[in-house]
Image (tube, rainbow, N blue to C red):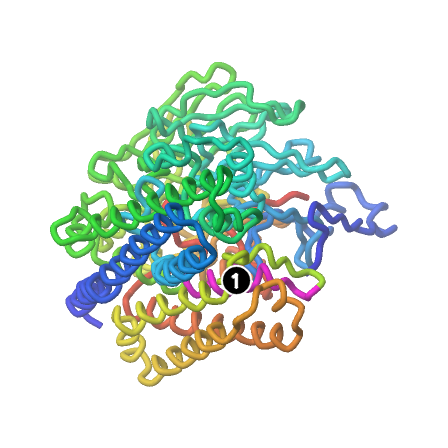
Amino acid sequence: MSAAHAEADHAAIAQASLTEIIRPFYAALAEQTGALKGKVETLCSQPSAAALNETKTAFAATVSAWSKVEILRFGPVTQDHRYERLFFWPDPKGLGLRQLQDVLAKQDETVTEPDELAGKSVALQGLPTLEYLLYGDGAETLTMSGESGAFRCGFALSVATNIDRIARNVVEGWREGAAYEKSFLGPVPDDPHYHAPKEVTLDLFKAFTSGIELVRDQKLGKPLGASSEQSKPKLASFWRSGLSFANAAGNLEGVRALFAQGGFAQVVAQESPGVENSILFDLDHAIEVLRGIDRPMAEVVEDESLRVKLEALRVSLKSAAQTAGDMIARGAGLAFGFNATDGD
Amino acid sequence: MQFDRRTLLISLAGSAAVLALPEAVAAAFQPECFAASRKDDRGNFSAARFTLKGDVQAIELPGRGHDIALRPDGGEWVAFARRPGRFGVAISLGSRPPVWFASKPDRHFFGHGVFSSDGKLLYATEFDYANAQGVIGVRDATDGYHQIGEFPAHGMEPHDIALLAGGRIMVIANGGIRTHPERGADELNLADMQPSLVYVDVATGDLLEEHRLAPELHRLSIRHLAIAADDTVVFGCQYRGPEEDAPALIGFHRRGERPVIAEAPGETQAALRNYIGSVAADSGGGIVAASAPKGGLVTYWDVTGRRYLGACDLSDGCGLAPTHQSARFLLTSGEGWLATADADGAMSRQVSGFQWDNHAILVS
């Protein structure tokens, strides 16, 4: 492959990823966070079981939209702690829960003010907090008029508003003419974000491989454990809302889009025609299996037949990531490995 | 591999024959025990003391670890969080529970540290990011690793550190790149980065000697080092300039002299991919290994001759440690390989269930 050809590929991958994935997916997230905020507003002004259910539906839609961009750990979402503020996870020590329960016990009114909330602990500001407020202990107070429900709902509205603002800020950070667009599409040596086109491809490539790894290890491997006795279902993301598998499926949908529409499938096809289809097959199969699990993680970890199925899925994801990873690294001239991160 | 959440100790049985030999000779025949950080197949991070036969002791880490520092009496080892992490943990070879410590709230670790020669203090490279300056944090190893002070690193982004023989002088590899935890991996000063190799009096923190590279090499980030024979500091660099430049990446320096940067021959120089991940001296101090994980190569260098000796291939190979034998090293890989290799290129390797992190050390 000539150098000129390789450079052309990098520019095309950046362009396609920005217009086909990054912008539309973040726009979809902001649309859902806006709708969610509206539902919480209604819930607070007229508490009812029906309003809580509608809010939960909007929450699930937001998680679904978030899941697709959760794999993107570069760009405006990495500024001002936006990523952590949206999604402080994993949280194995339960830091977020402790802070949240503390706020609820003290009825600390300052959290109901989005501007003040944004300056508080990142663990209090995002989707896991809102999940607890909507699904955790005491969530039923949201369906009733009264002081404790009112405080909880005010907190939830503040979190939903904060989430919506952050999502909008990320959309804004990627818009046409924004600094990140400029450096993403036309990196120059002195740019603080990207110094060369290849580095943009590398970030996208990392999103692809670490997106698969995220599902394999964090979303499935850790909660499942080596056996049902060693399982830790509360390590799953969104276990309170039962959205753990939807979240993992959404992550892989983001990975799939990056592969199919971002241009990596073509890189793989150039290396070895046909392999791109087997990667897509593996991803589609995994998404289908995960979408088909409509049960909370706590039940799934006890179900031996599902465990076997999910362990097999973890193996196929590993091989897909390795096969695709090797070919993309070779085809796009990238050096990528556990120990190949600049600065270590 | 199963192990207790905190620690697992497996006693190594000594054999009667070994007891009859002088200690130093006997040690050379004992299987080496190493330590390194790593990640398992489920994404759990840990650090372990291990032989080529398996774990001797392991501890789960809250995030990805980086380098290990061994206390001079050999009685405990410390694992540091990878930058920009904030945790460290001291693990006793005996039964004492692990001692956890953290950087101050407005500091983070760079992942490297070293004990004072009497084992009483632990020095760690840290970033004071509000003031954008590198510091060396000082902790009391005899009292719970409480931080008792810090001194300037005299450069941006101190990464690896070591003490010269005698223990009074510290050498610091200042990478020169400014980042900020809130800006992710963004590198904020590539245009005017100033990497340096500095020597500091550990008793006073005073700057004794400072070396910067030629102006055209100001993007050659000095990051890792090893102390070889005659207090020769061998340092490995990462180049942040245009990829095709492929400058020499290995330097040699003795106090009072000028640094010598040595090139690998022919196509090997470009094959290093502008990136050295780790540097280690062998047990004799005459040979240094330098890994290039991006290039999938481990190179060997002659310390007195300041020259390249050879290389072997190891995909994502990065961690390096001396063994009991001269010219022989442990090599570890992010793809799971554990290998012993000689500077003449011979290598035997085995698979493990872990992705091994950038660095490894010889414990015993």
Residue furthest top in the image = B204
Q: Which residues are magenta?
A: A210-228
Q: Is residue B307 visible?
A: no
In depth, the one of A87 and B278 nearer the eye is: A87
Dot 1 falls on which chain?
A
- The residue that appears at 50% across and 36% down in the rendered structure is B86
Rendered view: B148 above or below A7: above
Q: Is residue A163 left or right of residue A217?
A: left
Q: Is residue A124 left or right of residue B191?
A: right
Q: Report the predominant secondary structure element of the magenta stretch.
A: helix
Q: Is residue A207 magenta?
A: no
Q: Position of residue B51 (x, y in %)?
A: 67, 54
Residue furthest right in the image = B16
Q: Amino acid at mark 1?
A: Gly
Task: Classify residue B270 by image quadrant.
Answer: bottom left
Q: Is residue A258 visible?
A: yes
Q: Position of residue A333 (x, y in %)?
A: 29, 65
Rendered view: A259 above or below A28: below
The quarter of the image holding the C terminus of chain A is top left
Task: Classify residue B55 by image quadrant.
Answer: bottom right
In depth, the one of B233 and A195 nearer the eye is: A195
Q: Position of residue B167 (x, y in %)?
A: 56, 24
Mark 1, secondary structure of its residue:
loop
Which residue has dot 1 on it? A242
- The residue that appears at 45% across and 79% down in the rendered structure is A285
Q: Is residue A213 magenta?
A: yes
Q: Is residue B260 left or right of residue B169?
A: left
- The residue that appears at 20% across and 38% down in the rendered structure is B191
